[in-house]
Amino acid sequence: MTDLTGLLDDRSILDLAEQGMIVPYVDTLVRDGVISYGPSSYGYDVRLGTMFKIASPFHLASSNVIDPKAVDDDHFTSVDMSDHAGPIMVPAHGFILGHSLEVFDIPSDVFVIALGKSTYARSGLSINVTPIEPGFRGQVVLEISNHTPKPVLLYPNEGISQFVFIRGSRPCETDYEKRGGKYQDQRGVTHGKV
């Protein structure tokens, strides 16, 4: 079993980013007129990508139940914002899947926890707290819920989540790649898989 040795500071994250852990990597925190992104004290604020799946109202879906073992695409509306400037709307009490703009290649001695940014939390949106395992490669799918009775705007290409990096005392024996992780090398938004 690997012991966690501690949080990676901004210098350690920069060193790993220079080795390809975060692409594209922004080396200073960007925050003028945007929801911030870039390096933070013990992490990195990632940007929201441009592909989305918005949960459809039940009357538009082929059934009234979403099965996490076999997600029916009828339950979601796909939206591509890559050619559009501006925000996308999360419906009142709605749910949306997005993805990180950045692509990650996590070393086998680093564990990552994705947390929501307070700017969105204070507007009623929550980002699922999710682990990103050692050895994972790809964009990270972000699960976003609107807890308010009003629509809330999301801004592609701006900050969405803070990733906190934790180093282990040694590499995992069986990291995400070695065990054939089902989301390895994902791009854009993918549904849950069994």
Image (spheres, rainbow, N blue to C red):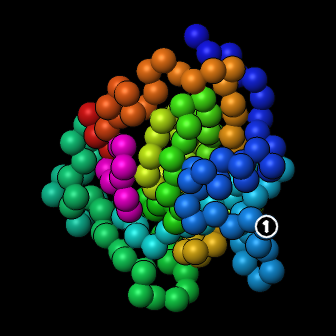
Q: If the image is split into quadrants, where does the N terminus sit?
A: top right
Q: Is residue 23 left or right of residue 25?
A: left
Q: Which residue lies furthest to the front in this view?
A: 19
Residue depicted at x 75% and y 23%: 5
The secondary element bearing badge 1 is classed as loop
Find the magenta span and give its range.
183-191
Instruction: Decide: is 20 above or below 57.
Output: above
- Pointer 1 local density, CA inside 10 Å: few below 14, some 14–19, many at least 20: few
Percent across and percent down for residue 174 are 44, 21
Q: Residue furthest top?
A: 1
Percent across and percent down for residue 38 are 72, 63
Q: Is residue 103 visible?
A: yes
Percent across and percent down for residue 111 are 61, 33
Percent across and percent down for residue 121 are 70, 58
Q: Nearer the viewer, residue 131 or 146?
A: 131
Q: Is residue 135 left or right of residue 28?
A: left
Residue at image mark 1: 29
Dominant secondary structure, magenta = loop
Amino acid type indicated by mark 1: Leu
